[in-house]
Image (tube, rainbow, N blue to C red):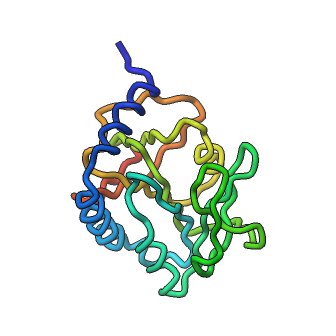
Amino acid sequence: MVESKENIRKQFLQKRDGLSADFISISSKQIRKNLNKIEEYRNAQSVACYHSTGSEVKTHEIMQEILSHGKTLGLPRVKGNEIMFCDVKKFEDLEKGEFGIMEPKQNCPILEKFDIIVVPAIAMAENGQRLGYGMGYYDRFLAGKNTLTIALAYTKSIAKNIPKSDSDILIDMIVTEDGVIESKIG
């Protein structure tokens, strides 16, 4: 029997939410170090990222690093059924959004193109199949884009298999505390 995305999402979210603050902090630092080993990421001039919340891989230091290197940082803002990425120059440009997640204020300009898009994941399969929160925002945003995508995930969040829907977009690379997985097959 194939397990449903909803069951897998629930299992992995429970597992992730049970991680200690120390584990999350230490692993997030190692994930940032491993992210910086990717040449395309280091050379990128514009990076779309996400503002972490809860037990997600912490992105604050990643965002700070992008800004301190003078690169363009795009963060998502929810508008209806879509997300758009807006130019953020400093953390004061953020406010609490629709889901209680920090997002760019209305006056931040919308960005259209990025060298790299860093995406959140509840779980990832090594073939690049991503399991998000089930609302499809990232899949809709990534559809038709030919930009390198990188998911940040704990090693404990790597699943053997995640069911694929027609609208799911595969992610190019997965960065965990243990290393980098180049994911897309074929």
* Residue 55, position as x, y percentages in the image: 38, 52
Residue located 28% across and 58% down the image: 21
Is 82 situated left or right of 26 in this image? right
* Residue 8, position as x, y percentages in the image: 38, 29
Q: Furthest residue to the top?
A: 1
The quadrant where residue 31 appears: bottom left
Please tell me which residue lies in front, 150 or 78. Answer: 78
Is 57 situated left or right of 72 in this image? left
Q: Quadrant of the C terminus?
A: top left
**Image vertical order of residue 168 relative to residue 49, above or below:** above
**Image vertical order of residue 120 relative to residue 162, above or below:** below
Residue located 39% across and 63% down the image: 58
The quadrant where residue 60 appears: bottom left
Residue located 48% across and 30% down the image: 164
Q: Quadrant of the N terminus?
A: top left
**Image vertical order of residue 8 relative to residue 91, above or below:** above
* Residue 104, position as x, y percentages in the image: 66, 67
- Total number of numbered discs in the rendering: 0
Please tell me which residue lies in front, 19 or 130. Answer: 19
* Residue 11, position as x, y percentages in the image: 34, 31
Residue located 59% across and 56% down the image: 146
**Image vertical order of residue 33 relative to residue 81, above or below:** below
